Image (spheres, rainbow, N blue to C red):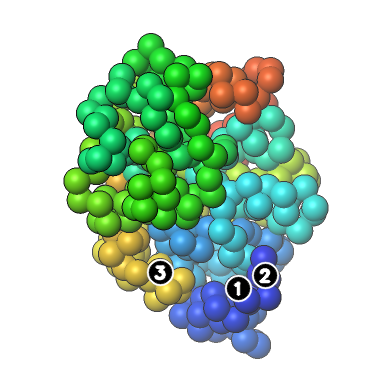
Amino acid sequence: MKFRNATAALVAAVGLVLAVSGCGGGDTPGTTSGTDGGRERVKLNVGYIDTSINGVGLISVANDLKLWDKAGIDVTLTPFTNGPTQIQAMAAGSLDVGYIGGGATWMPASGQAVIIAPSEATFGDFLLASPDSGAKTVQDLKGKRVGVPDGGSGEMILNLALTKAGLTVDDITRVPLDPPAVVSSFVSGQIDVAAIFSPLSDQIREKVPGAVVLANNRDFPETTFLGAWVASPGAATGKQEEVRRFLEVYIQANDYRKANPAKAVELAAAASGAPANQLQGQVDNLQWYTSDEMLADNGSGKTRERYAALQKLFLQLGRLTSEAPVEQWVNVDMFAAAKASLK
């Protein structure tokens, strides 16, 4: 297993840790070798979010269980801080597969990637009001300063809440901020309300215990925020065997972490250096689907229904300008093939 990094600093900080803690058995540090049951070995470039239990958590479990060798994959792992930069790397040709949160779903919906596994439903997105703001309900947001990152799930939860309350973005003072700045601005009183995702929402609630929850994902059951593993358009069509084998790794690692969440947190914390309590907070605000559940949802059409709802939301947000058939950007066939190959 080889580690290529998004930045030079990440090479030392994350790649080395994962190489030491997760790989094992390579001829040289950072590479893998071994048997794959007679299949010809393949190469694959895989990205992940290094602060996410859904990213580094999945990768660290795969490393610990030595699943890359089992699947016959010589993998190069690259840590990123978010989903959109992974899709940018795909466009540049340096990444085949990566993980994105629900807020980046508009990118595959616009043809920039192909969803190959809907990993989890997340419930860590919050609309939080300062106890000094006087806001107790979403209807109280009129004229309030709302800090929200452009794009992403914070923007999504804000839109859903405003729409349900009969308001629009014109009724508030929208303050676009980088995600960490939402936390600092809320704590310092520069904004009245934060529209933000986990773990930053958890940080706000820890630092301002009196913060008022105005809205959360659970208030909108008709719109599921789905994190997902995606493939570049080129890999989805030109590296189908490699992507299918990645899904073999994914299925086994995902089912393991579903059954052993504490161990997944332990491995992810050791690999990334992220605080275990922060990673556990993410686990507490999500629902991982087992591979059997994903296979059933893919077959029944529920997966496509969920993505159709997300596409509708991104059209409302203006992130998308036209609708594309979900079948064009969500591939359920490779997952079924990978599941069948593991029987």
Bin the neighbour count of mark 1 within 10 Å (Cα to Cα): few under 14, some 14-19, many 20 and up: some
Whole-Å distance between the Cαs marked 3 and 2?
18 Å
According to the picture, the residue beneath numbered tag 3 turns out to be 274
Residue at image coords 34%, 52%: 187
- The one of 337 and 324 positioned closer to us in this rendering: 324
One can see residue 153 in this view: no
User: What quarter of the picture does the N terminus occupy?
Assistant: bottom right
Tally of numbered tags: 3
- The one of 268 and 172 positioned closer to us in this rendering: 172
Query: Which three-letter amino acid code belongs to the residue tagged 1?
Result: Leu
Whole-Å distance between the Cαs marked 3 and 1?
13 Å
88 vs 134: above or below: below
Q: Are marks 3 and 2 in contact (CB under 8 Å)?
A: no
Q: Where is residue 325 drawn, in percent x and y?
A: 64, 19
30 vs 178: above or below: below
Whole-Å distance between the Cαs marked 2 and 1?
5 Å
Query: Which three-letter amino acid code belongs to the residue tagged 2?
Result: Thr
Bin the neighbour count of mark 2 within 10 Å (Cα to Cα): few under 14, some 14-19, many 20 and up: few
Residue at image coords 34%, 43%: 124
Mark 3 vs 1, N-terminal side: 1
Give the image quarter of residue 128. Answer: top left
